[in-house]
Amino acid sequence: MSGSTAPYLAGALSLKVQWALVQRFLDEIPLSETHALSKNWISTLEKNILVTALVKKRSELELLRSEAEHAEITSECEIEFPSYDVAFRNSNNEMTGEQISSASEGRNRNALHVDVSRTHKGVEGFPILAHRSLISPLSPTFGPRRGALLTGTVNRRRSIPHSPIHNLRNGNNIETKSLVLRDWEKRVLWESAWIHIEEHLEEYAGRFGVIDEGREKENVWEELVGLRVEGSKLIKGIRSEREDVRG
């Protein structure tokens, strides 16, 4: 996708659909093309969405840097390489291929139709905005309020797929095991937090929006691209270290 073919949305899409598009364009298109995306397209995005994406990418980079520091010590305490897209993949904010194609090819805003209700269903079929969540944003585990029934959101969160931990009994160094397990704990908490944030995107985008630092949208996008480059290098290095350790 080049700058000339990037979609010109003219603010016609909801925050959740904008978020899905940003994630797809940022994570899936070739790096050489991310810089060339149309400034017209970037300018039509809500700034809060870009800032929220920046917060997510920054926090992910902190995890990757820590995991990269300990990648070489996994011979005795091995954790399988995490699934870095679990938060986005398991959220209800994904778009279908048909919707992505429609958004990418539709230059006429009147011809662009996205069925948000079909892709962003709430608990038991109720739209998210019409069904107030019982989840407490102040709870460190994002659990239900005291006395509240478990919702489908909580049940889904508890069934998040994760990579198993192996060979911890073979580790002789308690400190080494602690470092690896601490990285694992941070990863699980990060994934859980972002599932919650993406399911309540309107609220959190507004809260993250206060830290935009007065920057232009294009500058925020450029930092996002830079973080993607750094993240790709870190992931490659982690994989290489672990392959060398495994021999």
Image: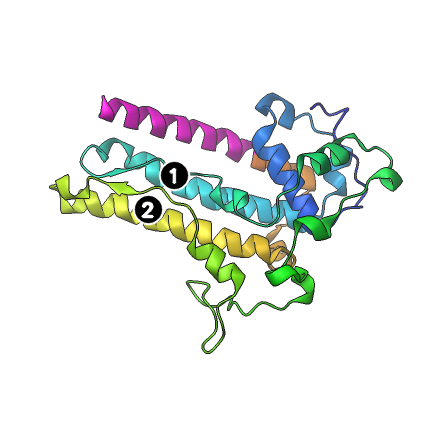
The residue at the point 23 percent across, 25 percent down is 246
Front-lying residue, 193 or 41:
193
According to the picture, the residue beneath numbered tag 2 turns out to be 184
Q: Residue furthest bottom?
A: 147
Q: Are marks 2 and 1 in contact (CB under 8 Å)?
A: yes
Magenta region includes residue 233: yes
Magenta region includes residue 216: no
Mark 2 vs mark 1, CA separation in Å: 9 Å
Highlighted range, magenta: 225-247
141 to 98, vertically: above or below? below
24 to 31, vertically: above or below? below
Q: Is residue 214 visible?
A: no
According to the picture, the residue beneath numbered tag 1 turns out to be 82
Q: Is residue 112 visible?
A: yes
Label 1 CA crowd tier, 10 Å (few <14, some 14–19, many 20+) = few
Kind of residue at badge 2: Trp
129 to 167, vertically: above or below? below
Element carrying mark 1:
loop
